[in-house]
């Protein structure tokens, strides 16, 4: 009995093993957060299907299929580096923006919020339409590629300049990553659900559409009504005052009950 117990103890993880398991699990979780709802996730699922087919061919002893899939998987690692190159670049960039690393390199969030709120307020005052996207956990690189790639600091003056009517980029969306504008004039997906309020324009539908596909926070300024709207998780909060916008950006208060408009599903 004692011999059996000593053998079983070999399978009991120590504190160092548990630490390694937690570290690997955290890395896998972060990778899945980055690639979810992107083409990389679809490619990853395809790789898993091929791997499952390879294991099945081994079990059933399908030598021809096993040989073909073995060759495919051998060269698949090199192909994956090429295919996933944009996602790998984004992942490394986002790693530097991790909340864990912000302790070492703190981000001036209050200044960022001040610049965004001031810029949006000026756009409202001038009745200039705008759509501003703030990236959260899910990467927006595939949407940034549809516009002009930029890398400039966020400022109220820059936001006003980009959305000034007549400029080349005023019709698209601005994508903000961290404290930088990473793209301007970007094209966003429209919501696939029917929107009951016909007064909502293309900007509002695009804001809802992106918030349905990602966890991004999207700010919309209507040039017709000079009102601010905020889209989050597929829902739209309308008639947002600057003080409320500051609260949403700071994450200090929960959403007001009943203030969000959810589009009904298509019939």
Image (cartoon, rainbow, N blue to C red):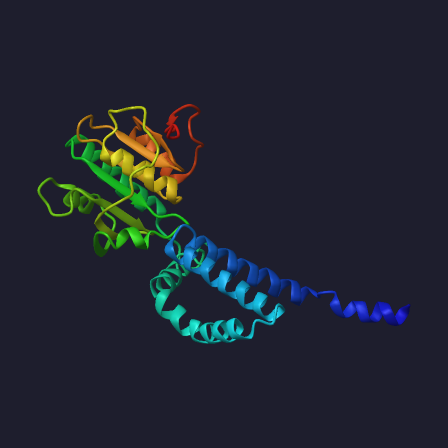
**Where residue 101 sits: x, y (%)?**
44, 58
The residue lying at 26 percent from left, 24 percent from top is 198
Location of the C terminus (image quadrant)? top left
The residue lying at 60 percent from left, 72 percent from top is 61
- Quadrant of residue 188 in the image? top left
**Where residue 138 sits: x, y (%)?**
40, 50
- Furthest-left residue in this view: 166
Left/right placement of residue 9 relative to residue 206 reads right
- Quadrant of residue 163 in the image? top left
Left/right placement of residue 62 relative to residue 163 reads right
Name the residue nearer the viewer: 175 or 195. 195
Left/right placement of residue 12 relative to residue 198 reads right
Q: Is residue 5 above or below residue 31?
A: below
| Number of on-image labels | 0
Res. 181 visible in picture: no
**Where residue 228 sits: x, y (%)?**
27, 31
Q: Is residue 81 above or below residue 138?
A: below
**Where residue 191 sits: x, y (%)?**
32, 37
Res. 128 visible in picture: yes
Name the residue nearer the viewer: 204 or 51. 51
Location of the N terminus (image quadrant)? bottom right
Q: Is residue 18 above or below residue 154?
A: below
The residue lying at 29 percent from left, 49 percent from top is 176
The residue lying at 81 percent from left, 71 percent from top is 7
Left/right placement of residue 88 relative to residue 119 reads right
């Amino acid at each position: 009995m004692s011999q059996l117990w000593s053998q079983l103890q070999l399978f009991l993880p120590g504190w160092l093993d548990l630490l390694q398991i937690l570290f690997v699990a955290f890395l896998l979780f972060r990778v899945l957060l980055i690639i979810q709802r992107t083409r990389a996730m679809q490619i990853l699922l395809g790789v898993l299907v091929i791997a499952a087919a390879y294991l099945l061919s081994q079990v059933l002893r399908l030598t021809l299929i096993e040989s073909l899939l073995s060759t495919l998987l051998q060269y698949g690692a090199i192909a994956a580096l090429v295919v996933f190159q944009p996602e790998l670049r984004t992942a490394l960039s986002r790693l530097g923006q991790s909340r864990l690393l912000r302790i070492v390199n703190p981000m001036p969030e209050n200044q960022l919020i001040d610049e965004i709120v001031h810029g949006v307020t000026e756009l409202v005052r001038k009745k200039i339409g705008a759509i501003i996207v703030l990236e959260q956990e899910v990467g927006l690189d595939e949407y940034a590629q549809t516009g002009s790639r930029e890398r400039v600091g966020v400022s109220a003056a820059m936001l006003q300049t980009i959305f000034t009517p007549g400029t080349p980029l005023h019709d698209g969306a601005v994508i903000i990553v961290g404290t930088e504008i990473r793209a301007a004039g970007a094209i966003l997906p429209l919501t696939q659900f029917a929107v009951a309020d016909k007064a909502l324009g293309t900007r509002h539908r695009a804001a809802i559409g992106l918030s349905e596909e990602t966890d991004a926070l999207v700010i919309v300024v209507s040039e017709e009504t000079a009102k601010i709207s905020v889209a989050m998780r597929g829902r739209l909060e309308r008639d947002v005052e600057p003080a409320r916008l500051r609260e949403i950006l700071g994450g200090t208060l929960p959403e007001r009950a009943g203030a969000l408009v959810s589009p009904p599903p298509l019939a």
